[in-house]
């Protein structure tokens, strides 16, 4: 079965994009789609790409053009992608003044293309309008607000997505990757059962039956992550977060990869024999226990211990920090590290006692 893949052409300085639909010979080419690797099994390397900050109603012509090229690249290469879509108007967000003088488009160029490729592209709800909460101590749209206020914005955003023909969304992604217990309460009340955010829980957040997928890696370093996974026969997930400002075509100092380099990266990864490309919801379905809140707490403890240990000898006992492993693996490493800490303290105490005699 052949898909439809667009060729993109930018016209002059206007930033307009014309989509020419052509038949593509690129079927989804990854081990999961071809049935060669069972996702989530021991030894499988599972890669999840998460692309943030696509506006439902359209951003600037410049943003839409680059977003469309990125998503088209993943479709053309047959690689699954989870896209964090902002339902609200760009003018309400802190990104509304990113391109002064460039008008906000009345209709997104990106969303019709995403809707035509839901087999590979997953839509996740990215907050409501990606605006900052003045009362929050951290960059956030949702923390330090009541559960009722948070739920109101969550449901307004979902209604906008539904009106655009995007239904059945199961994954919520809070802007700035920040949330609190009231966010989890609001999401549960609104019918969500999964979240993808950063590597930290904000406060003592717990929610039974709620899946949590942390975004740990960026575009650079994925191949190092894959090499690490080959050496340890455990079920591994590499969750990659990137934005259009990470691409050199955007022209920002924090960019670290061009579209051509991203294309070459995807092609190299596809040649790996034991790799699966999954969306966030596919990853949860493949290994629900690995993405439970209890598993994430095991990772959080490990992450704190990782920061405390800098000796090369101890680093050997630690798993690579940008790969997400099963909870039992983290608990084993946590126990080993805590035991080493106890031994180190005992030895240090003995040395001090001897010195004081």
Image (tube, grey):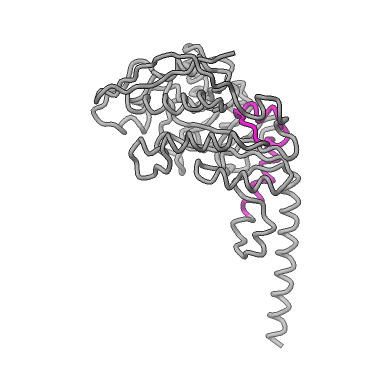
Residue in view at x 60 percent, y 22 percent: 170
Indicate the quadrant containing the C terminus: top left, top right, bottom left or bottom right. bottom right
Residue in view at x 75 percent, y 39 percent: 42
Is 17 displayed left or right of 79 in the figure?
left
Indicate the quadrant containing the N terminus: top left, top right, bottom left or bottom right. top right
Residue in view at x 51 percent, y 23 percent: 75
Q: Is residue 276 magenta?
A: yes
The x, y position of residue 347, in whole percent, is 73, 74
* Residue 274 against residue 26 in the figure, above or below: below
Residue in view at x 64 percent, y 48 percent: 228
Q: Is residue 321 magenta?
A: no
Q: Can you tell which quarter of the image residue 275 is in?
A: top right
The x, y position of residue 160, in whole percent, is 47, 16
Q: Which residues are magenta?
A: 275-304
Q: Can you tell which quarter of the image residue 67 is in?
A: top left
The x, y position of residue 341, in whole percent, is 70, 64
**Nearer to us in this view, 341 or 64:** 64
* Direction bottom: furthest residue: 357
The x, y position of residue 355, in whole percent, is 68, 85
Is 21 displayed left or right of 267 in the figure?
left
Q: Can you tell which quarter of the image residue 62 is in?
A: top left
Is 74 displayed left or right of 298 in the figure?
left
């Amino acid at each position: 079965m052949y898909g439809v893949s667009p060729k993109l052409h930018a016209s002059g300085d206007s930033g307009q994009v014309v989509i020419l639909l052509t038949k593509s010979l690129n079927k989804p080419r990854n081990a999961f789609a071809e049935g060669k690797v069972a996702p989530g099994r021991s030894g499988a390397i599972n890669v999840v790409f998460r692309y943030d900050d696509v506006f439902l109603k359209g951003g600037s012509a410049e943003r839409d053009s680059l977003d469309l090229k990125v998503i088209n690249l993943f479709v053309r290469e047959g690689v699954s992608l989870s896209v964090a879509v902002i339902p609200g108007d760009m003018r309400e967000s802190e990104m509304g003044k990113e391109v002064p003088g460039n008008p906000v488009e009345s209709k997104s160029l990106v969303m019709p293309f995403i809707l035509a490729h839901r087999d590979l592209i997953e839509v996740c709800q990215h907050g409501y309008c990606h605006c900052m909460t003045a009362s929050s101590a951290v960059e956030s749209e949702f923390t330090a607000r009541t559960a009722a206020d948070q739920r109101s914005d969550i449901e307004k955003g979902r209604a906008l997505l539904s009106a655009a023909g995007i239904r059945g969304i199961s994954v919520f992604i809070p802007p700035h990757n920040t949330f609190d217990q009231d966010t989890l309460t609001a999401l549960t009340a609104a019918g969500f059962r999964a979240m993808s955010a950063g590597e930290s829980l904000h406060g003592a957040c717990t929610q039974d039956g709620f899946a949590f997928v942390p975004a740990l890696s960026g575009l650079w370093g994925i191949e190092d992550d894959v090499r690490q996974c080959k050496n340890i026969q455990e079920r591994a997930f590499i969750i990659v977060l990137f934005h259009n400002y990470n691409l050199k075509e955007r022209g920002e100092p924090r960019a670290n990869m061009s579209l051509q380099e991203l294309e070459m990266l995807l092609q190299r990864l596809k040649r790996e024999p034991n790799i699966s490309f999954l969306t966030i919801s596919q990853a949860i379905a493949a290994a629900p226990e690995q993405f439970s809140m209890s598993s994430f707490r095991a990772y959080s403890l490990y992450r704190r211990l990782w920061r405390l240990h800098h000796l090369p000898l101890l680093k050997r006992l630690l798993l690579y920090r940008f790969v997400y492993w099963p909870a039992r693996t983290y608990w084993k490493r946590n126990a080993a590290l805590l035991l080493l800490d106890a031994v180190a303290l005992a030895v240090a105490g003995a040395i001090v006692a001897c010195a004081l005699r």
